Amino acid sequence: MSGAAYPVGVSARDVAHERAPVRSSEPAGAYQHLVVAAPAIAALARPGQFVAATVGGATSGMLLRRSFSIHAVDPDAGTVEVVVAAHAAGTTWITERRIDDVLDLVGPLGQAFPLPDGGGAAVLVGGGYGSAPLFWLAQVLRQRGVHVEIVLGAASADRLFGVALAAEVADAVDVTTDDGSAGTRGWVSDVLPEVLARSGATDVYACGPMAMLRAVTEAASAAGAAAHVAVEEAMACGVGVCMTCVMPVIGADGRTRMVRACLDGPVFDGDRVRWDAFGDGLCRVPDDAVGAPQAGGH
Amino acid sequence: MSGAAYPVGVSARDVAHERAPVRSSEPAGAYQHLVVAAPAIAALARPGQFVAATVGGATSGMLLRRSFSIHAVDPDAGTVEVVVAAHAAGTTWITERRIDDVLDLVGPLGQAFPLPDGGGAAVLVGGGYGSAPLFWLAQVLRQRGVHVEIVLGAASADRLFGVALAAEVADAVDVTTDDGSAGTRGWVSDVLPEVLARSGATDVYACGPMAMLRAVTEAASAAGAAAHVAVEEAMACGVGVCMTCVMPVIGADGRTRMVRACLDGPVFDGDRVRWDAFGDGLCRVPDDAVGAPQAGGH
Amino acid sequence: MVDLSTTLAGATLPNPLMTASGCAANGKELHRFFDISRLGAFVTKTVMPAPRSGRGTPRMAETPSGMLNSIGLQGPGIDAFADEDLPWLASVGARVLASIAGGTPDEFAQVATRLLSSPAAASVSGIEVNISCPNVASRGLVFAIDPLASAAVIAAVRAAVPAHLPVFAKLSPDVTDLVTIASACLGAGADGLTLINTTLGMAIDLDRMRPHLGGITGGLSGPAIRPIAVRAIWQVRAAMFAERIPTAPIIGVGGVASGRDALELAAAGASAIQVGTATFNDPEAPVRVLDELAGLLDERGYAAFADVVAAAHPERRRQ
Amino acid sequence: MVDLSTTLAGATLPNPLMTASGCAANGKELHRFFDISRLGAFVTKTVMPAPRSGRGTPRMAETPSGMLNSIGLQGPGIDAFADEDLPWLASVGARVLASIAGGTPDEFAQVATRLLSSPAAASVSGIEVNISCPNVASRGLVFAIDPLASAAVIAAVRAAVPAHLPVFAKLSPDVTDLVTIASACLGAGADGLTLINTTLGMAIDLDRMRPHLGGITGGLSGPAIRPIAVRAIWQVRAAMFAERIPTAPIIGVGGVASGRDALELAAAGASAIQVGTATFNDPEAPVRVLDELAGLLDERGYAAFADVVAAAHPERRRQ
Ligand SMILES: Cc1cc2nc3c(=O)[nH]c(=O)nc-3n(C[C@H](O)[C@H](O)[C@H](O)COP(=O)(O)OP(=O)(O)OC[C@H]3O[C@@H](n4cnc5c(N)ncnc54)[C@H](O)[C@@H]3O)c2cc1C
Ligand SMILES: Cc1cc2nc3c(=O)[nH]c(=O)nc-3n(C[C@H](O)[C@H](O)[C@H](O)COP(=O)(O)OP(=O)(O)OC[C@H]3O[C@@H](n4cnc5c(N)ncnc54)[C@H](O)[C@@H]3O)c2cc1C
Ligand SMILES: Cc1cc2nc3c(=O)[nH]c(=O)nc-3n(C[C@H](O)[C@H](O)[C@H](O)COP(=O)(O)O)c2cc1C
Ligand SMILES: Cc1cc2nc3c(=O)[nH]c(=O)nc-3n(C[C@H](O)[C@H](O)[C@H](O)COP(=O)(O)O)c2cc1C
Ligand code: FES
Ligand code: FES
């Protein structure tokens, strides 16, 4: 196996396809923290973007790429970092990779978090491994003079990611767990109103489960802040060609369309997302969406 | 990964199913020589039998087991050895396994080489990696006081397996290569008549490509010796349940039947095999086989 | 402990797991790996009136997550089966679902009659009528692509078999309208359906630039086709809920390699599950799947396997 | 250098590799990874008369060596396509095989007419008529399961399109007799056939015990179905050799992920090859497959791609 990362295909201005050797892989609570050599991706990425990896190796029965938020990049070292939860067979395979094993990566993909011009305050909210992209974002924001507070939530202490890191990169950190095994017992949305009030944040950045993103959006709206949420929709390609990752989002013209989370997202303005369409693990097409099946029709 | 071999399923009297950790894997010319820990198989196996391994790991798109002759066993150490040519994706995967990686093995499978009561002389003929099971056989035969000569043939020197080993376990060794890069230029069948004549062998044991086995059978018949040939038919299951590995063989009643190479073979008496049915990579059902499609019928 | 028993048109089996016809020979080979009487039923290789050599080789090609076979119904013929194989199966305590075929409806009936004249006939829990083998020289012989031909075979077998013995029609997914075929079989007296046989596929030998299989085309099986099996079972079960066809038990088969896969076919509507190609990967697959399924049901708090049969249908959830 | 060009009913393309409809959007996304004008043709996402939202989500499920989708023909409608997407494709020099659909034969014809009124109509090398999308609310709308309905659509499109522009009918494998459907399409004026669209499948969400896909059933694609595609191409090409149906070019699609796979479909009878689901695994797949195919042909000493088309048919070898 080659020790050096090398490009697989054409590397266009804003996206690359690289074979990325694993440089390190360490457990981090319930997750695995991987550092891989992917210089082209490292050079292009911005916080909020993601990478998509093939799984299972050359003889794999799993065709589709798995998406992961970029946790950190080091353009000088040419490395990219991701935090992976072993959910099912594909992610388990990734967490089992050893040093020098190679990941086939496409990235950076999707829209990054929008950055304010400077100053002010922002609150960053991460659920479980959803916190992965926030620390890098915090650093970028603070470089712009933004006061940054981080709220981390998870089901239990082992499913929190980056509590120590948060203390390094943010001005204040709040932690919640469903079972009270760390921080405040409860959800991030329980503490968020207070954090928003005390920080006077104008922007809230969030990444985590859909239900959390919806609650964060509501709390932000109530506090008069803008919510920038990074969603996690099931994706087959990650690059905008399959139309599997769509969700109803209100456009600039006020009309709802089924847009691709991989291309137009994963970061959306929270108040543009049609949260009413989500429920019970499904997302309906709202009746008023462009091209929706005619009501009463067939 | 567990360091110790352990059984997966029921281990019946004569067959076992084990998860076998790789103990060593070394290149041997064009092949890879693997030693794995599989104590139950090691305890049961006899020369000429084979093992069948799954390929590609837990997320593999390749369902079928790959078969390999047992090269050697050490019942005390609980190890089994195989010699693998990287033919296509499945065998390539096996040759890439590292120490402590686990192979899922079923074995020992099939009929072993029949052994003479003792004394006399035998010639063992191996084509390419087909020689793998012969060295162990040579040792067993010599323990019974049989004079053993080995003939090894291959396309080129790097595709010979076990030339040095042959010298250790046999009374005489002949080598042929198609390109003359080692030993006599030509085929094993070119030198075989002379070896048979000088050794006075009553039994010829052979393993290799079909065309070679046929030629060996003819040479043995001409010399009045019995040919015991280990065939290599494409196998889906290796354990007798799929009926894919059949070939036409004449039974004790003189009638030809399509019999399973994995169960009734891989070792057959050369003069029982209907060589006339093989050709151009296909094997026809002879018209006189039991249950053959009616000639002229449909 | 989850109650794993399942009832198929009167025949109660201790559990829903079965071998699939042609993927387990006639029992002896797998009995080296596990006690085949642990299975709900052992499904035998399709047997025909006379001994059959099957096709030449190659008879198989591996494909992504699947395989093609063109065995061509090799077998000893019904006499040898009834006199030797069935008694052996009975001797180890296996419950037998006997798979039969013939060239005409009459031949099917003759095979069924001869089968039941076996000294071991009592071990037969049911008859699976294979009208869907794609490995026959003429596609015209695949009865299951035509409702009338299917019905003729089923009616002939039903007439030859005592009423207490359930008859299952094994169908092919390679049809435009599976529900119509299912309906014809049930109308002709089938007590249940086995869904699905292999789907027709093909591979090319690129070195010799000719069809890879001796039989040119072959039957595609294995996990690759599981989504087709789930769909077929769902469609037919949905037609039963909609009362377009009579309600009858479905035996599910196609690509099952794990307890989760078995649960998927059951949730789509299968009252029993056969494991075929997965056995080539793991000779203990049928009982491993059974154990995994039992574990999954237990974890999820089901009291009985029967509770998950067709559980993914909204009609069932409303019940 | 191997001559890679291929001729499809009068349209000569520099090479046989294409994207597959619905697996490459309308070009911009893949153009970030490779120059789409390198392809023999770019096949666009099926476009319908009006904008369409498609189905709710989940729209996909991964399956062994395959996937299910129930996109439901999401798209911008023919106006936006003709005014925006097609001109962009023309601007980068892509040759376009435009995939169209409608709810009635008339709608198909309207879409074709409107397409050709685009300022970029000259970039259209042919029209692929998608009569086989399984992701429509009623299976009755899958024209390709019925010869008469198929013929009606093809005749309407053929009448709306100038004679020099080839029309391809894209067929479904989910039929009892594919050759009859192919025959009906060719008889109605199709210049060629695209084989195959996805095959109908289904997956169950075992946690929620309900169908996994928003659309309940979905189309199965990927390497899992390649043996079905090879079989379909072979059957139809064999019927042409047997003069049961007129000889016409076949565009092969289904499970192609490598140059070997492309060669397999070509040897079965395909004059051009589309790469669909493999693009989700590797965004450069269509051009990688092209390069691998060129390498294989070169290694094997073929002078031209045309020499391997249908090369596995005995009739071809006898020629
Ligand atoms: C933009 C984005 C960023 C993500 N970031 C991270 C991260 O930083 N760390 C992390 O551990 N996980 C992350 N995920 C989720 C991760 O992609 C899924 O857990 C993973 O795809 C599941 O693969 P599997 O083989 O384990 O599960 P399976 O359920 O077997 O996957 C089956 C199929 O469904 C798709 N799928 C299933 N769940 C998801 C999901 N939640 N999101 C997208 N596709 C899914 C897979 O891609 C695959 O095609 C992210 C997802 C998205 C969309
Ligand atoms: C009894 C027996 C003993 C063998 N001993 C050895 C050995 O000691 N060393 C060694 O290197 N090889 C041996 N082989 C051959 C080895 O099994 C094949 O090379 C291997 O199965 C090919 O797998 P693949 O994935 O590389 O090739 P692929 O061509 O991708 O295999 C595809 C399918 O065809 C089957 N297949 C292909 N070629 C063969 C073949 N020649 N024999 C059986 N099945 C085949 C595979 O099992 C698989 O199911 C033996 C075969 C048999 C039957
Ligand atoms: C090698 C092989 C032989 C088969 N022989 C038969 C048969 O004789 N009769 C029959 O009804 N089905 C036969 N089948 C079909 C299986 O019983 C089963 O319906 C199909 O393979 C799908 O299940 P699977 O994916 O679990 O294998 C055979 C399948 C294979 C792979
Ligand atoms: C996500 C997805 C969307 C598709 N959309 C269309 C479509 O709009 N029109 C069409 O004719 N085929 C469509 N198809 C079918 C493909 O074009 C192709 O026929 C099929 O997927 C088999 O090829 P593959 O295995 O290479 O993907 C779609 C397939 C997928 C996977
Ligand atoms: S994941 Fe394919 S379009 Fe978004
Ligand atoms: S390989 Fe299955 S019967 Fe021999």
Image (cartoon, coloured by chain):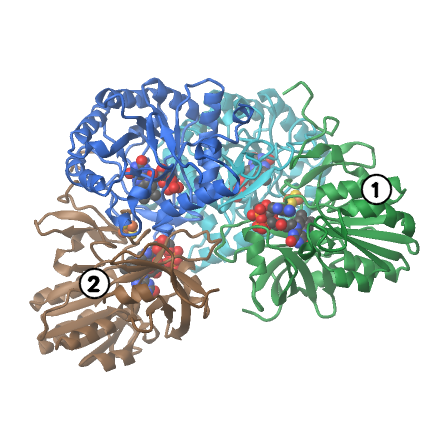
Chain colours: A brown, B green, C cyan, D blue
A25 in relation to A89, above or below: below
- Ligand 1: which quarter? bottom left
- The residue that mark 1 highlights is B219
Chain of the residue where label 2 is placed in the rendered structure: A
Chain of the residue where label 1 is placed in the rendered structure: B
Say whether residue D38 is left or right of residue B222.
left
| Residue C249 position within the rendered picture, expressed as x and y whole percent measured from the top left | 47, 37
| Residue C147 position within the rendered picture, expressed as x and y whole percent measured from the top left | 46, 23
Q: Is residue A296 visible?
A: no
Quadrant hosting residue D125 = top left
Label 1 Cα crowd, 10 Å radius (few <14 / some 14-19 / many 20+): many
SS for callout 1: helix
Quadrant hosting residue C98 = top right
- The residue that mark 2 highlights is A112
| Residue B118 position within the rendered picture, expressed as x and y whole percent measured from the top left | 91, 56
Say whether residue D204 is left or right of residue B188.
left
| Residue D100 position within the rendered picture, expressed as x and y whole percent measured from the top left | 25, 32
The type of residue carrying mark 1 is Ala
The type of residue carrying mark 2 is Ala
A15 in relation to D125, above or below: below
The alpha-carbon separation of the residues under discs 1 and 2 comes to 75 Å
Residue visible at 44% across and 42% down?
D294
Tell me how many marks there are. 2
